[in-house]
């Protein structure tokens, strides 16, 4: 016995009142390194031990705020910067839609982080052994007794004094607890290979489980029931409609959003007469026009509209846009040709919006002027 | 620590006369202003009655719910302060009186009460089997009757127990309370839908009843906290500790969050779906000067109470708790104003002496009822078997 190192002296009590009284006495006797073990949380124990409020709540606060801001930042970056997608006609960054996720991430990070912090910082996790483990004392306080320990490292500690104090408090069971040799010699750290490999194994196991459930289990019955739905897919048959088509034509006279029907189909004269370019030839408009012209027109008409097609005879060479005829065309004429096409030139109505067509026209005018510059233009 | 009659020195209590005077003074001032307002602008006056009506209903009905909740949940911590909520629930007797002027100005308040208009509007005429004056009146009367019935059943038993000290009364109350729970859920939804949602008869929101419920509980908890802090400061409650205050504060804090959660749920779904028949309600409150009120509501009803009650000490400090409770009570009134008044004035905010006159009268009514009731009744349920455990309650 004597060559063993003393860890603490423990005492057991029978009722909450007794332990509260004992704690108060121990504290008044000046001991600071002591702890209490009870089968359930005792009201008033914090006050009796004069415990300071736990710092764990600050860990939770900091982690929670981290969750809030990282979630918001990530969603902003994904949906407004990196891959902007219009969803339901909402702005890219629309806060209401992000609030539920922000809330979840906040709670998730705060709760998981708090548990992890508690395990690793407060309970010093990889160190899983404690001299009180596997003692009669621990067994009693986990069932029906209330225990107090005064640790040997307390500056006022003296085994005989402590024992007599406990005796004065009329504890029925006073024992001294000693370190086991292993507990003195071995200190576990987070970087121990055993611990690291345990963590790695956990990670791999969880990852594998996740992968498996997402890639296989999802396709098993009944998890795949959502796939089978009572709806008509595009391009599929339907027994409901008499013509057998699943897809329907829009109701007569309906107009798609943003598309106003072109009124001068087959009537270039009116287009030339009534259509006026609504855009001002600003820098932005010309840049846009250039972009669209180079994309849609230049393959046939050439970068300068000279008719120098890059299609190498795959397509009949188109006429020059620098010709006298096109230079004298009204804007409405060119708009008409882009919209409905001309002979073998196809219509670009579907690819190029109305505004872009007018921008292209501005750009063509600029091209024409650049190729037929007058003396006065140089000034 | 056994039950000790000498401990109960709070049984004898003399409320300061000034409190009673304050109540009557507020009521008199309020009523005077109300009478004037009735001649100045009858419609506006009616809408304001509606706000105060709902406000009083919140406190009265919410308090009865808290009483029932304590019985059903078997809570002990709140037993010593249960009487406070019982006193507040006497407001349920005044609410039917307030409904009378509302009945006579129905046509000013409720668009759907005009049968000629309803007949021409398909949306409204299809709702008319529910939204019509006779059925509305029946529903209202049934709600009032049910609330008063349960008030009499539960609170009477509780008061009887002071003399009889009969444990069976608690058991009976538990049963009544359990029945009251679903009844309460249905009637409060009816009340919220009938009196507030139907102001915009085209609009609907399935969460509206819960939304009003959240505010109701806040109002009831806040009133109870105000009274409890007042009692503690005046020395009527000598055995209450910060543990009881903390529990009240924690409940307040929880329901501040619950309110925000429900309010946001309602907003998020409507905002996301973006359906014209649903968005109008929020659009109205997001246009012109109402926008300021809407933003202020978020701050007043959520942000400030949230941070005001977040930390543990702030839930135990009587002064802080008193301030936050008054604040939350005001926030609930503000919430009702935001729910009701935009229908009266679509163009923008209306805020004048009239909007203050009615709450003044309402607060007066609450104080008077409370002091009247407390005069003849113990402010602690001295016959309740849970009382001693409640007094010993520690966190």
Image (spheres, grey):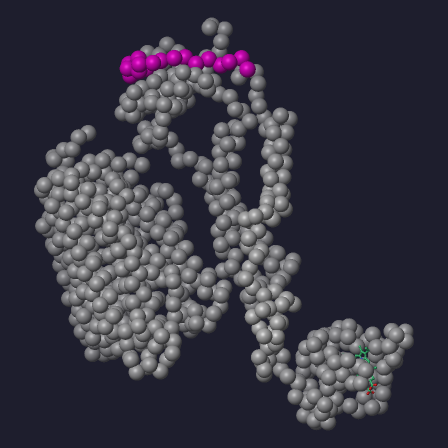
Determine which quarter of the picture holds residue A311. bottom right
Quadrant into which the C terminus of chain B falls: top left
- Name the side, left or right, on which A326 lies relative to A336: right
Vertical relation: A170 (above or below) A311: above
Quadrant into which the N terminus of chain B falls: top left
Vertical relation: A153 (above or below) B172: above
Vertical relation: B331 (above or below) A361: above
The extreme right residue here reads A313
Residue A259 at x, y percent in the picture: 63, 79
Determine which quarter of the picture holds residue A207. top right
**Nearest the eye: A31 or B217:** B217
- Name which residue lies at 74% across and 80% down: A347
* Magenta span includes A170: yes
* Magenta span includes A313: no
Residue A165 at x, y percent in the picture: 32, 14
Vertical relation: B15 (above or below) A310: above
- Name the side, left or right, on which A173 lies relative to B34: right
- Name the side, left or right, on which B55 lies relative to A98: left
Q: Magenta stretch?
A: A166-182
- Name which residue lies at 57% across and 51% down: A224
- Name which residue lies at 38% across and 73% down: B202
- Residue B137 visible in the displayed image: yes
**Nearest the eye: B325 or A12:** A12
- Name which residue lies at 55% across and 59% down: A229
The extreme top residue here reads A2
How many numbered circles does the render carry?
0
**Nearest the eye: B162 or A18:** B162
- Residue B380 visible in the displayed image: no
């Amino acid at each position: 016995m004597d060559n063993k190192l003393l860890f603490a002296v423990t005492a057991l009590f029978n009722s909450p009142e007794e332990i509260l009284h004992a704690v108060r006495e121990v504290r008044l006797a000046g001991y600071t390194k002591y702890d209490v073990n009870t089968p359930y949380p005792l009201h008033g124990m914090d006050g009796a031990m004069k415990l300071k409020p736990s710092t764990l709540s600050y860990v939770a606060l900091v982690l929670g705020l981290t969750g809030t801001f990282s979630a918001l930042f990530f969603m902003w970056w994904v949906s407004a910067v990196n891959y902007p997608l219009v969803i339901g006609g909402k702005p890219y960054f629309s806060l209401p839609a992000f609030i539920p996720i922000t809330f979840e991430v906040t709670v998730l990070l705060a709760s998981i982080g708090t548990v992890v912090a508690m395990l690793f910082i407060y309970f010093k996790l990889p160190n899983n052994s404690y001299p009180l483990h596997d003692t009669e004392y621990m067994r009693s306080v986990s069932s029906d007794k209330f225990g107090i320990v005064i640790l040997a490292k307390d500056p006022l500690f003296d085994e005989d004094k402590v024992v007599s104090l406990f005796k004065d408090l009329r504890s029925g069971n006073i024992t001294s607890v000693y370190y086991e040799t292993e507990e003195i010699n071995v200190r576990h750290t987070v970087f121990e290979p055993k611990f690291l490999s345990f963590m790695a194994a956990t990670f791999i196991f969880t990852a594998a489980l996740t992968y498996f459930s997402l890639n296989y289990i999802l396709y098993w019955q009944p998890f795949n029931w959502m796939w089978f739905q009572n709806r008509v897919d595009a391009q599929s048959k339907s027994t409901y409609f008499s013509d057998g088509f699943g897809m329907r034509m829009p109701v007569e006279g309906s107009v798609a959003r943003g598309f106003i029907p072109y009124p001068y189909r087959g009537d270039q004269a009116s287009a030339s007469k009534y259509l006026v370019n609504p855009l001002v030839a600003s820098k932005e408009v010309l840049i846009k026009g250039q972009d669209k012209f180079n994309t849609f027109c230049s393959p046939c008409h050439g970068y300068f509209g000279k008719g120098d097609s890059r299609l190498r005879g795959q397509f009949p060479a188109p006429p020059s846009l620098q010709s006298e005829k096109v230079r004298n065309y009204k804007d409405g004429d060119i708009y008409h040709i882009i919209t409905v096409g001309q002979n073998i030139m196809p219509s670009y109505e579907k690819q190029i919006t109305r505004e872009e067509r007018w921008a292209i026209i501005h750009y063509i005018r600029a091209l024409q002027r650049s190729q037929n510059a007058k003396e006065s233009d140089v000034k | 620590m056994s039950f000790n009659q000498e401990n109960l020195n709070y049984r004898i209590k003399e409320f300061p006369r000034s409190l009673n005077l304050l109540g009557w003074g507020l009521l008199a001032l309020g009523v005077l202003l109300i009478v004037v307002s009735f001649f100045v602008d009858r419609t506006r006056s009616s809408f304001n009655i509606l706000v105060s009506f709902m406000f009083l209903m919140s406190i009265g009905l919410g308090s009865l719910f808290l009483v029932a909740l304590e019985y059903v949940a078997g809570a002990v911590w709140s037993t010593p302060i249960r009487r406070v909520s019982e006193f507040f629930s006497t407001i349920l007797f005044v609410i039917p009186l307030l409904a009378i002027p509302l009945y006579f100005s129905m046509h000013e308040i409720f668009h759907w009460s005009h049968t000629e208009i309803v007949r021409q509007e398909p949306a409204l005429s299809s709702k008319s089997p529910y939204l019509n004056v006779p059925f509305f009146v029946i529903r209202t009367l049934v709600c009032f009757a049910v609330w008063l019935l349960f008030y009499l059943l539960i609170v009477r038993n509780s008061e009887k127990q002071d003399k009889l000290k009969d444990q069976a009364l608690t058991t009976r109350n538990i049963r009544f309370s359990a029945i009251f729970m679903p009844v309460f859920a249905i009637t409060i939804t009816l009340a919220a839908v009938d009196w507030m949602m139907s102001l915009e008869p085209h609009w609907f929101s399935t969460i509206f009843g819960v939304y009003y419920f959240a505010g109701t509980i806040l109002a009831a908890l806040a009133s109870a906290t105000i009274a409890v802090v007042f009692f503690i400061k005046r020395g009527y409650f000598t055995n209450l500790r910060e543990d009881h205050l903390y529990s009240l504060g924690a409940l307040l804090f929880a329901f501040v969050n619950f309110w925000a959660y429900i309010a946001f749920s309602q907003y998020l779904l409507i905002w996301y779906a973006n359906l014209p028949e649903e968005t109008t309600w929020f659009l109205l409150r997001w246009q012109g000067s109402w926008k300021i009120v809407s933003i202020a509501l978020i701050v007043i009803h959520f942000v400030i109470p949230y941070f005001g009650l977040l930390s543990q000490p702030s839930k135990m400090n009587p002064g802080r708790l008193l301030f936050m409770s008054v604040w939350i009570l005001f926030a609930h009134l503000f919430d009702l104003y935001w729910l009701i008044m935009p229908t009266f004035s679509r163009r923008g905010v209306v805020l004048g002496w009239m909007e203050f006159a009615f709450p003044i009268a309402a607060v007066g009514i609450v104080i008077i009822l409370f002091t009247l009731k407390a005069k003849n009744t113990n402010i602690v349920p001295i016959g309740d078997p849970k009382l001693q455990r409640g007094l010993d309650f520690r966190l």
